[in-house]
Image (cartoon, coloured by chain):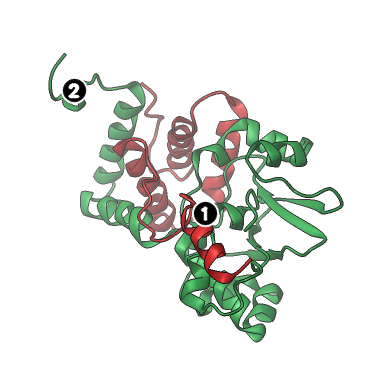
């Protein structure tokens, strides 16, 4: 096997990271929910692990719920725990 | 059915909930629309598996960097300018002829964002999270990654504070390639350990 055949085979692989522009969200609200969590951690002076603990609990509590919905539940709980909000935004 | 069905689609409860939380956070001065846009833009375009591919290609090309990377992943990755949330405790595990490494997060979705971007959907799903621990060889084969009998599979659970990155085996036949060409060979999945190069 020579170098060019490896290269050719590799370039056919769609998972190749040729750029960083892969679409990572199925819907815009998922991207906003991600950004809100990143900013909430940063601007409340918390640790990322504090949010992660809420995410673990949220997934564990309802394993079949879609991932980004569990993320939003975790964000809601994180904002409650850090006293940003006084009550849950659950509708 | 409308021509413009994206705008006609009924809003879902979770979208309303995101709106409500955004309004509350804005009211508290914790965010503004521009801040949200810049974070989304960052995760959609600035970080992703190309960063990890650059780390791998450097390790293949530079033996001293390779050693630094295995000794202290976080620092060696920061040398290339990559860091941030989910990138504080990076450990790089190296594939060899005898050992194949694969990464999972059994409890949620921990993943090395600075070098791989955000995780793919299957990584966050329950079947991957449980089966990678229970029957990694079977699952890997189903994902198109047949690990030869006799090669040990080590599964690393990212649920501790550690984020793992797999350093794949350098493909045979790649000896004459430069670092940029090597980076183009490195797939995202190979750095999670669900593909072999």
Label for residue B5?
2
- Which quadrant of the rendered structure holds the C terminus of chain B? bottom right
- Which quadrant of the rendered structure holds the N terminus of chain B? top left
Point 52% across, 68% down: residue: A4
Q: Quadrant of residue B41?
A: bottom left
Whether residue B131 can be seen here: yes
Chain depicted in green: B
- Distance (Cα) linking label 1 and label 2: 37 Å
Label for residue A48?
1
x and y, in percent, of residue B8 in the image: 17, 21
Given the current orientation, which residue lies at the most extreme right position?
Answer: B150
Residue sitting nearer the eye, A45 or A74: A74
Whether residue B83 can be seen here: no
Given the current orientation, which residue lies at the most extreme front position?
Answer: A1
x and y, in percent, of residue B15 in the image: 31, 29
x and y, in percent, of residue B13 in the image: 34, 22
Side of B190 relative to A73 (left or right): right
Give chain A's shade: red
Residue sitting nearer the eye, B96 or B18: B96
Residue sitting nearer the eye, B162 or B100: B100
How many C-alpha atoms fall within 10 Å of the one at disc 1: few (<14), some, or many (≥20)? some
Point 62% across, 76% down: residue: B60
Residue sitting nearer the eye, B86 or A13: A13
């Amino acid at each position: 096997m020579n170098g060019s055949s490896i290269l050719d085979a590799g370039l056919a692989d769609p998972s190749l990271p040729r750029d960083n522009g892969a679409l990572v969200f199925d819907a815009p609200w998922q991207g906003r929910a991600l950004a809100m969590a990143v900013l909430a951690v940063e601007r409340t002076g918390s640790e990322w692990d504090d949010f992660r603990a809420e995410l673990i609990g949220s997934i564990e509590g309802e394993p079949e719920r879609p991932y980004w919905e569990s993320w939003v539940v975790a964000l809601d709980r994180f904002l409650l725990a850090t006293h940003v909000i006084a009550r849950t935004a659950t509708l | 059915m409308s021509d413009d069905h994206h705008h006609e689609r009924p809003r879902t409860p979770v979208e309303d909930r995101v709106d409500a939380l955004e309004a509350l956070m804005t009211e508290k001065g914790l965010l503004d629309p521009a801040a949200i846009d810049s974070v989304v833009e960052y995760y959609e375009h600035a970080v992703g598996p190309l960063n990890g591919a650059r780390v791998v290609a450097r390790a293949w090309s530079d033996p001293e960097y390779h050693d630094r990377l295995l000794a202290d992943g976080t620092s060696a990755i920061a040398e290339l300018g990559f860091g941030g949330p989910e990138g504080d405790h990076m450990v790089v595990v190296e594939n060899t002829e005898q050992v194949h490494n694969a990464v999972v997060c059994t409890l949620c979705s921990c993943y090395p964002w600075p070098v791989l971007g955000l995780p793919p959907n299957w990584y966050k799903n329950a079947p991957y999270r449980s089966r990678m621990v229970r029957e990694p060889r079977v699952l890997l084969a189903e994902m198109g990654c047949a690990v030869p009998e006799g090669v040990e599979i080590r599964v690393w659970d990212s649920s501790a504070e550690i984020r793992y990155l797999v350093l794949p085996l350098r493909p045979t036949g790649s000896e004459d390639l430069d670092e940029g060409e090597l980076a183009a060979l490195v797939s995202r999945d190979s750095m999670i350990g669900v593909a072999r190069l």
